Image: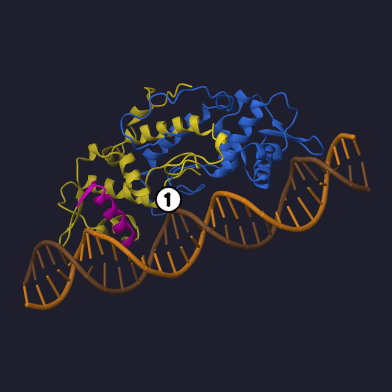
Chain colours: A blue, B yellow, C orange, D brown
Amino acid sequence: MLKLTKKADYGLMALKYLAEHPEAVALSAKDVADAYGIPAQLLAKILQQLTKKGLLRSHAGMNGGYALARDAREISAFEVILAIDGPFFITSCTKGTKACELTPSCTIKEPLARVNETIAGVLKSISIQDLAEHEHQPAKASEGHGLVALTL
Amino acid sequence: MLKLTKKADYGLMALKYLAEHPEAVALSAKDVADAYGIPAQLLAKILQQLTKKGLLRSHAGMNGGYALARDAREISAFEVILAIDGPFFITSCTKGTKACELTPSCTIKEPLARVNETIAGVLKSISIQDLAEHEHQPAKASEGHGLVALTL
DNA sequence: CTGAATGCGGACCTATCCAGTCGGATATTC
DNA sequence: GAATATCCGACTGGATAGGTCCGCATTCAG
């Protein structure tokens, strides 16, 4: 279906939340989870993962919690998704190092790899800061086809 | 992981194969499946689905099979994926009609919807014909015109 | 007319993986 | 030392993708 996992969603939401509260020294996983109604333990693991990847700084103990490791402008959505979901490929055949086994098949793979790069590029161009300041208008809701229903 | 299902891959491969064999009146699901080492019965169902969606024409009986319903240039990868995997949303929260329940949460959703549009746009710009002639050239989509712009 | 080749489509099985939970350890502060 | 945190591995339940099976309908060749 070409969609993000909930974990990635949660991770983005959490980072956005942290970016929106720069005054706080640190916010606990529970704080963020409560703010969004996310299962706290699940979010905790996600934040731990993001910490391991260097996107967050953590501090245990009372009044501990998480804070962004860098400026919100310096963290891209791409990094977050990559940290949580691992490397992604739009083609299902490219798994890790070795190419498609049913070999002559994936002539498909090559053009789609370009699509993949495009997607990655777009995600890299979006920073947590961009998510935090969401005063954008839905703009031109897809006029071409009503296929991509993004009406909220 | 943000990847296509194998079914969608198979579908694209099959359409590409049909586009590469315009001389054939019709090719059976088995023909295509054998050419790529795809499970025949599975591919059959995929092709049936594409037929229902109007991307293919089918003909039963001996020497029957499938053929493209339109010119290969007039069929986009987007249509194929949509026909097989159904509408896709990059955000996991938007399921069908109703919006995210944990509501104030998904301020995330709005910027990602734009990413979604971008992806859809790229996929719409790729035709089956593009896949068939895989002469590594079609860099047209990446030539920074609108598609990847995504003004934030 | 009969049989083979094909499309059509529902039911089903299975493996994988996501989402979420549990339990316990370690660190820090008061 | 108690309370609040992060940290981390293991487990479970459910959804979904991938694939199979079987029976029926359609077409065509002999």
Q: How many marks?
A: 1
Give yes or no for residue B56 being in the magenta stretch. Answer: yes
Q: Quadrant of residue A129?
A: top right
**Relative to B94, does residue A103 appear above or below in the rendering?**
below
Q: Label 1, secondary structure: give it.
A: loop
Q: Is residue A133 left or right of residue B88?
A: right
**Whole-percent x, y for residue B5 in the image:** 41, 49
**Relative to A130, does residue D7 appear above or below in the rendering?**
below
**Relative to A69, does residue A7 appear above or below in the rendering?**
below
Q: Is residue B43 left or right of residue A40?
A: left
**Whole-percent x, y for residue B140 in the image:** 33, 27
Give yes or no for residue A85 being in the magenta stretch. Answer: no
Instruction: Name the foreground residue: A99 vs B47.
Output: B47
Q: Is residue B17 left or right of residue A40?
A: left
Instruction: Name the foreground residue: A54 vs A17.
Output: A17
Badge 1 crowding class, 10 Å Cα cut-off, few under 14, some 14 to 19, many 20 or more, is some
Amino acid on which disc 1 is placed: Cys
Q: Is residue A107 left or right of residue A87?
A: left
**Whole-percent x, y for residue B132 in the image:** 28, 41
**Whole-percent x, y for residue A47 in the image:** 67, 40
Judged by its main secondary structure, the magenta piece is: helix
Q: Which residue is mark 1?
A: A100
At a point 82% along the width and 37% down the height, the residue shown is: A62
At a point 18% along the width and 46% down the height, the residue shown is: B22
Instruction: Name the foreground residue: B14 vs C27.
Output: C27
- The residues colored magenta run B41-57
At a point 17% along the width and 60% down the height, the residue shown is: B60
Pointer 1 chain:
A
Q: Quadrant of residue D3?
A: top right
